[in-house]
Image (tube, rainbow, N blue to C red):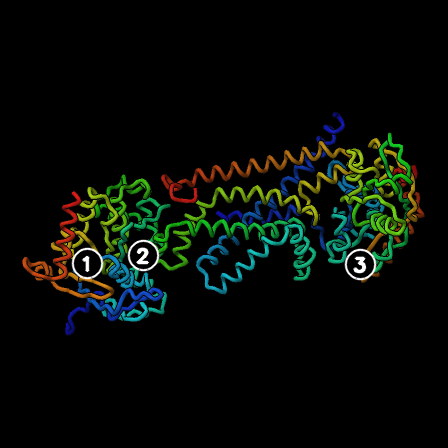
């Protein structure tokens, strides 16, 4: 019985993998929990600002592209182990990351903000000095910065780590944390859907987003850079910015 | 025909120890074709171990085994498998395969060991079951649905199906309720009348006196007495065997 | 909750496809585990000392290391290092399979040891080789005795499969989380995910129950582990 079922299952599994792209396809790894830059819509189609931008760049380069959702924690490992070829998914350019991967030119400046409940009257000072709990996505520069800043300045807030910032927002509404630290674009996305407000920046310097490729893929880096420059100069860039309400 | 036919089974100087306990201390015996030997002796004397050494279910420490005049290489697994196919074994507690019907208990060895096709194996199984007095309707029952006597008859049919040169019977009736012993004894008698070569450990006086060509009396790992029942059991004879059997008889009558 | 219902309705095909992926991961893992478990159990019971030692090491390793760590270890580490291009779904199935294999080995080993010793001796006495005896006599009985524990293992593997989202396997949890991130309908979506898992649990257990009934032998379970 097993002998009959096993090959069948294997075949189905290999086919149903579905997300196995053809060899000449560029695979873009995305954190599908990072709207509006990258997400999958309700029907499961990858979408978002970076997904569309990367699709346009790939079209210019004349290569096929597929977008594969990857857990954020493992996304750089996935790139280095060639599970994916590029990360176009709202990734901040940081010195630590730059040691492992090559970044394109920056395409977006991201502000770091605190998000609190809509009816909250908390101030930034209270958040930092009144033993509050702040949620943040693990593996992000803001998580690292907040931790170092608290140690340096003697703040007494507790950090709680989440898989994604939407989960942090969810827990904020549940009352388990007092604020969520995140990028301004996802914060605005949350604002549009949930009873939260943006308290404002909390002192972390602005960051720039770039697309990442493996260090040895110099040719790919040049091509993506060229495509990105071209796209940013075109009206399509503005269309995307408006579509995903990045400037609201 | 220059040589007379060699004995079906001949063993010499079998020794076996389990840890510090010497169970067999150099046992030799010879089983001619059609001969029936009966092993008797107090429990713990090594009867069961001896029987299991005869088909290497227990590998003897030293000693030789010859089947039809050909020595068996005890280190060679294939030869052991072949030896066991040709020397059938009947256990005290039947050891039917619990997950198989009476019929399949018989066909499984025919198919796996002898490579028979299913249909041929099943035909053979029906024949052997009929031989031990079990008809078709019993063939599809599982061991748990059979009485002790029926189980032992299936076990005998299972051994016979492989066309053994000899049968080893290790107290085949000891685990049976008294009223079920008769049906198994009937089968054994019928095998004897057909000339089956057998060696049997038993406490059944009837079998000892009427069937045996020779009695082997074992004690503490050696055969201490052997001879025909006519001699050893003769009235007035002071043989160990007769004393032992008389005691068995007393026990049996006391038990009724 | 019209919004949440609409979200669930829209995302249901996506989530159902994820459910199919979960089902595939779990079925393959259980089969891999069955094959490994049987081989390991037989080796543990009948093998020589070095064989038993190595197999014991395997069981100890896969029982001792968390599934999450194993997923990372194999997907990003070993498979890549070996140059194997194994997708996330297959990786998850293999890792879960190797893990449940260690647990299944213990289930089967216990069942083999629970069988009366005479079964093996009787098979040997008929001239069967050790392998024939194991295959035709020991395993059919041991596997039957193992079925209840094996069903239990199924529901454990099903739940463990939710961890596969960390390597990006497109299964129920990963997909639920994606949709929730976009729509902020966490509660209704995770409820839906729970129902989907329940569906798989029920389907699997009902199938195994049916199998158990079909394979039942009159009077057999009396002396087994039951």
- Give the residue number, with chain letter if any, for mark 1: B40
* CA distance separating discs 2 and 1: 25 Å
Q: Measuring from the top left, give residue B172's x and y in whole percent.
A: 23, 51
* CA distance separating discs 3 and 2: 65 Å
Chain under callout 2: C
Q: Is residue B65 visible?
A: no
Mark 1: secondary structure: strand
- Which of discs 2 and 1 lies nearer the camera? The answer is 1
Which label sits on residue C126? 2
Residue drawn at (49%, 61%), measured in percent from left and top? C52
Chain under callout 1: B
Relative horizontal placement of residue C200, taking residue A173 as reference (left or right): left
The answer to whether residue A224 is above or below residue A39 is below
Which label sits on residue A214? 3
Residue placed farthest to the left in the image?
Answer: B236
What is the crowding at mark 3: few (fewer than 14 residues within 10 Å), some, or many (at least 20)? many
- Which of discs 1 and 3 lies nearer the camera? The answer is 1
Residue drawn at (19%, 69%), measured in percent from left and top? B6
What is the crowding at mark 1: few (fewer than 14 residues within 10 Å), some, or many (at least 20)? many
Q: Is residue A138 visible?
A: yes
Relative horizontal placement of residue B134, taking residue C178 as reference (left or right): left
**Front-lying residue, C185 or A216:** C185
Mark 3: secondary structure: strand
């Amino acid at each position: 019985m097993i002998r009959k079922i096993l090959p069948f299952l294997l075949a189905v599994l290999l086919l149903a993998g579905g997300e196995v792209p053809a060899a000449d396809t560029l695979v873009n790894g995305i954190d599908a929990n990072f709207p509006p830059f990258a997400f999958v819509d309700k029907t499961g189609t990858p979408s978002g600002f970076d997904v569309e931008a990367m699709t346009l760049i790939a079209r210019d380069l004349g290569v096929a592209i597929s977008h594969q959702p990857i857990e954020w924690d493992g996304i750089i490992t996935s790139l280095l182990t060639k599970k994916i070829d590029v990360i176009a998914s709202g990734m901040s350019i940081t010195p630590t990351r730059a040691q492992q991967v090559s970044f394109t030119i920056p395409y977006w400046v991201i502000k770091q903000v605190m998000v609190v409940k809509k009816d909250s009257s908390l101030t930034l000072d209270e958040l930092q000095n009144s033993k509050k709990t702040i949620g943040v996505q693990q593996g992000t520069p803001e998580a690292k910065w907040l931790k170092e800043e608290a140690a340096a300045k003697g703040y007494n807030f507790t950090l709680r780590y989440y898989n994604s910032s939407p989960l942090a927002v969810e827990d904020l509404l549940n009352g388990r944390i007092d604020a969520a630290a995140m990028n301004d674009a996802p914060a605005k996305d949350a604002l549009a859907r949930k009873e939260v407000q943006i308290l404002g920046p909390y002192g972390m310097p602005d960051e720039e987003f770039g697309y990442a490729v493996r260090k040895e893929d110099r040719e790919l880096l040049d091509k993506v850079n060229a495509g990105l420059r071209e796209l940013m100069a075109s009206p399509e860039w503005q269309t995307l910015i408006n579509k995903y309400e990045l400037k609201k | 025909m220059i040589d007379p036919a060699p004995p079906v089974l001949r063993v010499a100087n079998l020794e076996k120890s389990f840890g510090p306990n010497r169970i067999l201390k150099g046992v030799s015996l010879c089983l001619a074709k059609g001969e029936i030997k009966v092993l008797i002796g107090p429990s713990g004397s090594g009867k069961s171990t001896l029987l299991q050494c005869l088909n290497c279910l227990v590998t003897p420490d030293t000693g030789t085994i010859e089947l039809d005049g050909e020595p068996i290489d005890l280190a060679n697994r294939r030869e052991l498998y072949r030896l066991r196919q040709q020397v059938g074994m009947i256990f005290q507690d039947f050891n039917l395969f619990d997950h198989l019907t009476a019929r399949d208990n018989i066909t499984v060895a025919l198919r796996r060991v002898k490579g028979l096709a299913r249909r041929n194996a099943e035909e053979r199984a029906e024949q052997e079951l009929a031989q031990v007095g079990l008809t078709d309707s019993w063939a599809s029952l599982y061991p748990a649905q059979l009485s002790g006597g029926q189980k032992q008859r299936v076990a005998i049919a299972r051994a016979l199906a492989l066309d053994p040169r000899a049968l080893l019977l290790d107290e085949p009736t000891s685990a049976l309720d008294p009223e079920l012993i008769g049906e198994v004894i009937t089968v054994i008698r019928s095998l004897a009348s057909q000339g089956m070569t057998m060696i049997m450990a038993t406490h059944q006086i009837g079998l000892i006196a009427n069937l045996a060509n020779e009695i082997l009396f074992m004690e503490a790992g050696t055969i201490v007495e052997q001879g025909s029942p006519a001699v050893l059991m003769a009235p007035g004879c002071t043989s160990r065997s007769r004393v032992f059997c008389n005691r068995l008889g007393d026990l049996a009558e006391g038990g009724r | 909750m019209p919004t949440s219902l609409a979200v669930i309705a829209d995302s249901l095909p996506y989530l159902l496809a994820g459910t199919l992926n979960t089902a595939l991961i779990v079925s393959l893992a259980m089969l891999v585990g069955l094959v490994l478990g049987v081989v390991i159990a037989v080796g543990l019971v009948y093998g020589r000392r070095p064989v038993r030692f190595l197999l014991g090491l395997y069981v100890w390793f896969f029982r001792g290391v968390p599934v999450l760590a194993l997923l990372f270890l194999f997907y990003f580490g070993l498979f890549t290092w070996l140059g194997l291009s194994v997708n996330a779904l297959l990786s998850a199935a293999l890792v879960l399979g190797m893990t449940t294999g260690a647990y299944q080995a213990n289930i089967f080993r216990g069942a083999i040891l629970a069988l009366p010793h005479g079964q093996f001796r009787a098979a040997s006495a008929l001239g069967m080789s050790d392998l024939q005896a194991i295959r035709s006599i020991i395993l059919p009985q041991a596997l039957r005795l193992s079925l209840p524990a094996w069903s239990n293992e199924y529901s454990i593997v099903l739940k463990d499969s939710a961890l596969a989202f960390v390597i990006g396997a497109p299964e129920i949890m990963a997909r639920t989380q994606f949709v929730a991130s976009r729509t902020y309908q966490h509660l209704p979506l995770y409820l839906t995910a729970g129902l989907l898992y329940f569906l798989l649990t029920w389907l699997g257990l009902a199938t195994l129950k049916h199998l158990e009934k079909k394979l039942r032998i009159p009077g057999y379970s009396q002396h087994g582990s039951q």
